[in-house]
Image (cartoon, helix red, strand yellow):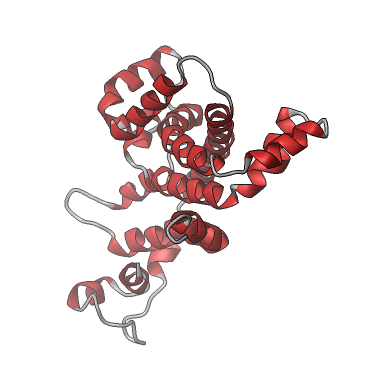
Amino acid sequence: MLLVLLNSVKKRGAIFDDPLALPDAATFTWIGYTKVMSNAGIGTMFMNSVIVTGVSLVLIVLFGAMAAWAITEYRFRGSRLLTLFLAFGIMVPIRLGSVSIMQLVVDLGLINTLTALVLVYVAQGLPLAIMILSEFMQQVPSDLKDAARCDGVGEYTIFLRVVLPLVRPAVATVAVFTMVPVWNDLWFPLILAPGESTQTLTLGVQQFLGQFATDWNAVLASLSLAVLPVLVLYAVFSRQLIRGITAGAVK
C-alpha cells in the first residue's frame, strides 16, 4: 500500500527507474490524480461502489444477525441441517455458480443494475456472517434474556436492545470481513453490471489498463483513492474487530 501511494505521486519514468525511491522535487507530480479526478465517470463509479457495498453490508449484518438469533435461540426441526447448509455456503466458492447466477439475473431482468450486485453479495456474505454471529450469540447468558422476558419485553426488543449490543465485536468483525471482498470485487461487476452507469470503482480502474500501454500514474492514483474507504472502516471498527477476533482466546 505504501509503494502504491508513493508511486502514485511520481512521474512515469521515475516509477520504472526506481519504484522503491521516495518522490523528490524532480519526480513529484499530481498528474495521476488529475487524470482520475478529471474523468467524468469516476464520481459515478465511486458512488456505485459506496451504494453496493453499503447496502450489502447493512443487509448482511441485519439478516445475518436475525438468522443467527433464530438458530441459536430457538430449537426447531431441521435447525442442525440448516446450520450444515450454511457451512456449505462458506466452503463452496460462489464463483463456481457464475454461469447460473448470470442466467438468473438475465431472466429476472436485473442485468446492468446495482440490485443484481447487492443480491449476489448478500448471498455471498450471509453464511459467514451467520456462523460468526451465532457463535457469539451462544455466549450471551440466558439469564439476561429470561430476565427481560419476565419483565414483559418482546422478542424483537430483546434481540435489538439486549443481544445485539453484547455482540458488537462480532458485528464489527462481520462488517470488515464483508466490506473488503465486496469493495474489491472485480468479477461480478464485470459480468453482471459492466455498463457505464453501473460500473464500480474497481471495474473503472481497468480503463486505465491498455493492451499495449498502461497509464500507471492514473492506475496507482485510482487504487490509492479506492483503498481509503477500507482504511476508514478499519480505523473506526479496529478496536471492536480485534476484540472480536481474539474473543475466547484467553480465559
Q: Please report the residue visible at 75 percent of the width from the left and 38 percent of the height from the top.
A: 147
Q: Please report the residue visible at 42 percent of the width from the left and 72 percent of the height from the top.
A: 30
- Is the residue 145 above or below the residue 31 in the image? above
Q: Please report the residue visible at 40 percent of the width from the left and 12 percent of the height from the top.
A: 107
- Asked whether the viewer can see residue 101, the reply is yes
Residue 19 position within the rendered picture, expressed as x and y whole percent measured from the top left: 23, 75
Residue 182 position within the rendered picture, expressed as x and y whole percent measured from the top left: 42, 43
- Of residues 180 and 74, the one drawn nearer to the viewer in this rendering: 74
Q: Is residue 225 left or right of residue 91?
A: right
- Is the residue 170 above or below the residue 159 in the image? below
Residue 101 position within the rendered picture, expressed as x and y whole percent measured from the top left: 35, 21
- Asked whether the viewer can see residue 232, the reply is no
Residue 198 position within the rendered picture, expressed as x and y whole percent measured from the top left: 46, 35
Pick out the residue farthest to the right. 151
Figure label count: 0
Q: Please report the residue visible at 33 percent of the width from the left and 82 percent of the height from the top.
A: 23
Pick out the residue farthest to the bottom. 25
- Of residues 29 and 67, the one drawn nearer to the viewer in this rendering: 67
- Of residues 46 and 238, the one drawn nearer to the viewer in this rendering: 238
Pick out the residue farthest to the top. 107
Give the quarter of the figure containing the N terminus. bottom left
- Is the residue 172 above or below the residue 163 in the image? below
Q: Is residue 224 left or right of residue 76?
A: left
